[in-house]
């Protein structure tokens, strides 16, 4: 049974709309920057605005909206995919992917950097989590990069940026959440981010090759033999087949995205425990506990975001924002530019999932007004929020990579700007060339 907040009419004037928007977002950002945990910052903002403005909503509305936010069946996939990421990060999958990438690409100039990017891309295809991607691959490649002579700052910056490629790969957790919010098909969305992910990886590889050649730290070597490539491919094969198997099942209609998450858990257990044998039964309780703690945090934030989203919807803030943007952005390209800037700024303070839950209800009506494809919109939003994950001074992958490399944020930042420029140029490209996101799912659909 779905919970719904009571329908109470409350119609302030235009000035109140504008002030209300400023108060809501100003209060939230002030609390978040003060270090208040995100869930409490969201709930406190919701309750405080209701009290301050004397809104005639019962406080039970906040509770019911919270429950309604975490109630949808599709969100069961979130903890399952989180657990899959933990399994694969600890179960030897990352190690074999790095070995396979090293055999194929380690001979190039900047070879270890190239291997890092390719490994993050491949591991992101099975984990769907930027943090898991950064932690699993970073723990393997950063020691090797430091031994080769790469600076700690460059190694950490590259891992922090490359880890976010997971958010554009087919099993992306933010894609799953966006599909739930927007109503678009996860089947289509899962393929829409693949070309942007490959383009972003290509831009980072170009940076790595330039760095390796210009600094002389990694000038390349001889390509591996066919035998070495075959052995590495056979070893990594079960891991590399996982996204093909899962996405193929979603695309063919054999299972839904939620069912796919359960299949991913079973597949991950089989690969990690019985094929690679890097996980033991005694390791599972700790992995389950870690995954459940992460999932609980995510779900609490989703619920709190649902409460604030209800207030924003009830007070028609989205409609007012649409009117304001419409008065400023008369054409689509101006709206898209404003969208990119707003999402990067939002993502600097908030993790991708809650940021997506907050931003999507506000921007989707505007996107439809400009006749944008909502699948393309999902790729744009996710790509921008991925950039925010490694934007100083805060960011999830930035902190993980800094810890792994034992590097300061200042050291990382010196090497980060070129990589950010490369990835942001790709974001701008996919923003204004929708076919880069849409042609692959449309081509696959034509075969059905």
Image (tube, grey):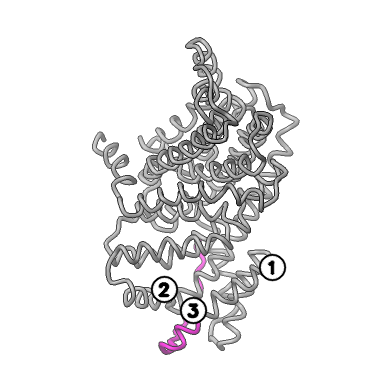
Q: How far, Cα to Cα, is label 1 from label 2? A: 25 Å
The numbered mark, 1 or 2, whose residue comes first in the sequence reads 1
What's the residue at 72%, 29% (across, down)? 281
Label at residue 36: 1
Q: Is residue 126 visible?
A: no
Q: Which quadrant of the figure contains the C terminus? A: top left
For the residue pair 27 and 161, the one nearer the viewer reads as: 161
What's the residue at 69%, 27% (across, down)? 279
Q: Which residues are magenta?
A: 1-21
The numbered mark, 1 or 3, whose residue comes first in the sequence reads 3
What's the residue at 42%, 52% (across, down)? 179
The numbered mark, 3 or 2, whose residue comes first in the sequence reads 3
**Is residue 50 shown in magenta?**
no
For the residue pair 277 and 382, the one nearer the viewer reads as: 382
What's the residue at 52%, 64% (across, down)? 346
Label at residue 21: 3
Residue furthest to the right in view is 282
**Is residue 13 shown in magenta?**
yes
Quick check: marks 1 and 2 in contact, CB under 8 Å?
no
Q: How far, Cα to Cα, is label 1 from label 3? A: 21 Å
- Mark 2 element type: helix
Query: How many neighbours does mark 1 have within 10 angstroms: few (below 14), some (14-19), or many (20 or more)?
Result: some
Query: How many neighbours does mark 3 have within 10 angstroms: few (below 14), some (14-19), or many (20 or more)?
Result: some
Residue 175 at what x, y percent from top left? 45, 49
Seen in the picture, residue 394 relative to 362 is either above or below; the reply is above
Left or right, 320 with respect to 91, comes to left
Which residue in the protein does label 2 denote?
Answer: 318
């Amino acid at each position: 049974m779905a919970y719904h907040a009571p329908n109470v009419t409350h119609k302030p004037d235009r000035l109140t709309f504008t002030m209300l928007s400023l108060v809501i977002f100003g209060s939230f950002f002030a609390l978040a920057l003060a270090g208040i945990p995100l869930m409490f910052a969201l709930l406190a903002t919701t309750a405080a605005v209701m009290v301050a403005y004397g809104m005639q909503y019962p406080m039970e509305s906040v509770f019911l909206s919270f429950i309604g936010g975490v109630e949808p069946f599709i969100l069961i996939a979130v903890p399952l995919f989180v657990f899959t990421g933990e399994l694969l990060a600890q179960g030897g999958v990352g190690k074999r992917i790095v070995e396979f990438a090293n055999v194929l690409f380690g001979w190039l100039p900047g070879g270890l950097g190239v291997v890092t990017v390719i490994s993050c891309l491949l591991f992101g295809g099975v984990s769907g989590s930027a943090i898991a991607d950064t932690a699993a691959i970073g723990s393997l490649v950063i020691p090797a990069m430091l031994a080769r002579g790469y600076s700690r700052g460059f190694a950490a910056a590259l891992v922090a940026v490359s880890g976010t490629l997971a958010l554009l790969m087919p099993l992306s957790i933010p894609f799953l959440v966006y599909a739930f919010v927007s109503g678009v098909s996860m089947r289509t969305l899962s393929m829409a981010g693949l070309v942007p992910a490959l383009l972003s990886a290509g831009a980072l590889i170009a940076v790595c090759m330039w760095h390796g050649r210009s600094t002389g730290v990694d000038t390349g070597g001889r390509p591996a033999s066919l035998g070495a490539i075959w052995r590495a491919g056979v070893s990594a094969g079960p891991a590399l087949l996982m996204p093909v198997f899962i996405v193929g099942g979603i695309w063919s209609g054999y299972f839904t995205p939620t069912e796919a998450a359960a299949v991913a858990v079973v597949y991950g257990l089989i690969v990690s425990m019985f094929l690679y044998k890097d996980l033991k039964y005694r390791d599972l309780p700790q992995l389950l506990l870690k995954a459940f703690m992460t999932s609980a945090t995510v779900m609490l934030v989703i619920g709190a975001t649902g409460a604030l989203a209800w207030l924003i919807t009830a007070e028609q803030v989205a409609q007012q924002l649409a009117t304001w943007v419409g008065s400023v952005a008369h054409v689509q390209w101006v709206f898209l530019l404003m969208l990119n800037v707003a999402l990067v700024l939002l993502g600097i303070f908030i993790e991708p999932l809650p940021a997506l839950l907050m931003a999507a209800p506000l921007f989707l009506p505007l996107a439809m007004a400009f006749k944008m494809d909502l699948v393309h919109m999902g790729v744009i939003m996710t790509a921008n929020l991925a950039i925010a994950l490694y934007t100083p001074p805060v960011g999830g992958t930035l902190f993980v990579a800094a810890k792994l490399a034992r590097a300061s944020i200042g050291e990382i930042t010196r090497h980060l700007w070129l990589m950010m420029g490369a990835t942001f140029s790709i974001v701008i490209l996919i923003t204004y060339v929708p076919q880069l996101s849409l042609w692959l799912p449309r081509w696959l659909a034509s075969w059905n």
